Image (cartoon, rainbow, N blue to C red):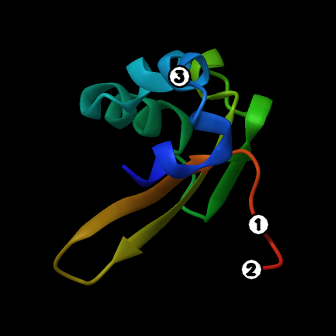
Amino acid sequence: NVLLEQPEFQNISNFQRILPALDKTYLNNHFKENFKDHSTQTLIGKENEDELLNDCSIITTQFDSGLIKGRIGVLGPKRVPYMS
């Protein structure tokens, strides 16, 4: 898991705090409840309403290929290496 390679989550207690939020069903429900807008959305840290995700950032966007509609998201640490 790439998330475990991030400095914030190498401390096991930090990772254990977000572990329940990484459940597929949990994330699916979180996306349905919090990302209803059709635009690209970014939530950083405490902008995430769920405390389990306060140390994370989530970026989502909607896609529509004509045959398939959906939303894709990326979950990562709150800190983002913008210079990379």
Please give the label number shown on residue 81: 1
Badge 3 element: helix
Residue sitting at 69 percent across and 27 percent down?
54
Mark 1 vs mark 3, foreground winner is 3
- Pointer 2: residues within 10 angstroms few (<14), some, or many (20+)? few
Which amino acid, by three-letter code, is at mark 1?
A: Pro
The disc, 1 or 3, on the residue closer to the chain's N-terminal end is 3
Residue at image location 65% in from the left, 57% down from the top? 41
- The residue closer to the viewer here, 60 or 20, is 20
Report, in whole angstroms, how far the alpha carbon at label 3 lies from the one at label 2: 26 Å
Residue 66: x and y, percent? 24, 83
The number of numbered discs placed on residues in the rendered structure image is 3
Q: Decide if residue 39 is on the left or right side of residue 62.
A: right
Q: Residue 5: x, y in percent?
A: 51, 50
Seen in the picture, residue 54 relative to 62 is either above or below; the reply is above
Residues at marks 2 and 1 touching, judged by CB atoms closer than 8 Å: yes
Image quarter of residue 21: top left
- In this image, 15 relative to 70: left or right? right
Where does label 3 land, which residue?
A: 12
Tell me which residue sits at (34%, 25%) in the image.
26
- Indicate the amino acid at tag 2: Ser
Rendered location of residue 16, percent (x, y): 48, 18
| Residue position for label 2 | 84
From the viewer's perspective, tell me whether residue 32 is left or right of residue 28.
right
The one of 18 and 11 positioned closer to us in this rendering = 11
The image's mark for residue 21 is none
Q: Looking at numbered disc 3 in the image, what kind of residue is underneath it?
A: Ile
Residue furthest to the left: 67
The secondary element bearing badge 1 is classed as loop
Q: Nearer the viewer, residue 6 or 59?
A: 6
Residues under numbered marks 1 and 3 in contact, where contact means CB atoms less than 8 Å apart: no
Work out which residue is located at the far right of the displayed protein and give it: 83
